[in-house]
Amino acid sequence: MDSSLVRIEGEKKMKSISKKFSLGLALILGLSACGSNNNQTATNEAPAEEKAQTEVVEKAEETEDTENSEDPLADKDVIKIGVVGEKNEVWEDIIQRFEEGTGKKIELVKFSEYREPNEALLAGDIDANAFQHKKFLEDFNESSGSDIVSVGDTLIAPLGIYSSKIENIEDLEDGARIAIPDDPTNGARSLFLLQTAGLIEVNGEEGDAITVDDITSNPRNFEIIELAASQTARSLDDVDIACVNSGIAVDAGLVPSQDAIFLEDPEDPDKQIYVNIVATTQDKKDSATLKDLIDNYYHTDQTKKIVEETSKGSEFPVW
């Protein structure tokens, strides 16, 4: 074969081999790059997944911290609730169920006078109270410049007229001595009750802050004696009749539905201002703990049953 032809053929083979080598090398490099990218992706995915999980945990912790910061009672070891009087079977049953259901503790702080639980609330000595009706709170806030708020209705406890000397209101003699509470709210409430019973006439409408000076007619010359609410039941031996709040009457061993000689009508629309409440301060009004206590432990059929049993039909749940 001609030497020039041999040279040409050799060059063709070398170019072919070189081209194949280049293609092979490119393929190898491409596969290596893919492998590197896959490894890098896998490497990147692992930290990303861990980061996402960390963010979920941190967000949950932030939510819990926010909830606790919004509820000043969330981390309290003992929640203190102020009441008036010694007989608190309804609250004792509620507290037992609440503590079993939540693990939180509640302490009842007992007072003897009506203003004391509100004063203790404002002083920070208790977290909430459950002794007063809506009208009493309204008048207290107005007179003291405070802003205590209701966070739940409980029951209505009719005011009654009691006597250890007569069994019927019709038997009351002229000139009889009548005891009423001396606080503005319950004093006015008592005067309206005496008017409803047909004993006197007053100037004003239910809920008005009337006093004995607003009596417009007292033809039988009754003597109205103002006493501390806690003393009205104890005065029954010294007066002819007394207007006594339900809780005070119960503490004195009286059963309003049986022992009162005249009783408010709990279904009277004008008396709904006397619905009892749970109250607290502005900073605790949105407490999830208080909401849970009222919605899930107070406002229950079990509580209604205890109210009926302990009051013997003298107090009426309003939820």
Image (cartoon, rainbow, N blue to C red):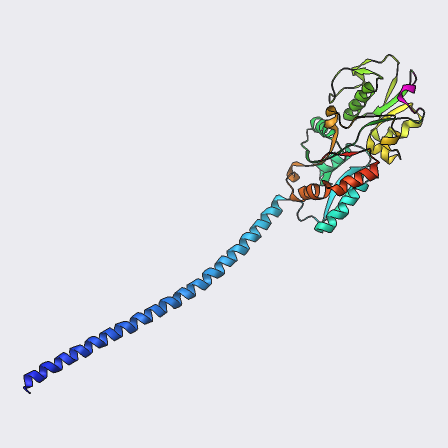
240 horizontally vs 30: left or right: right
State left or right for residue 99 relative to residue 60.
Answer: right
Q: Nearer the viewer, residue 304 or 273?
A: 304
User: Residue at 63% of width from left, 40% of height from top?
Assistant: 286
- Magenta segment boundaries in residue numbering: 166-173
Residue at the farthest bottom position: 1
Q: Is residue 250 above or below residue 2?
A: above
Percent across and percent down for residue 231 are 87, 30
Left or right relative to 173: residue 226:
left
Q: Nearer the viewer, residue 72 or 205?
A: 205
Residue 12 image offset from top left, x and y in percent: 13, 79
Q: Is residue 169 magenta?
A: yes
Would you say residue 105 is visible in this rendering? no
Identified at 55% across, 56% down, the residue is: 57
Specify the quadrant of the image occupied by residue 215.
top right
Q: Which quadrant of the figure has residue 10?
A: bottom left
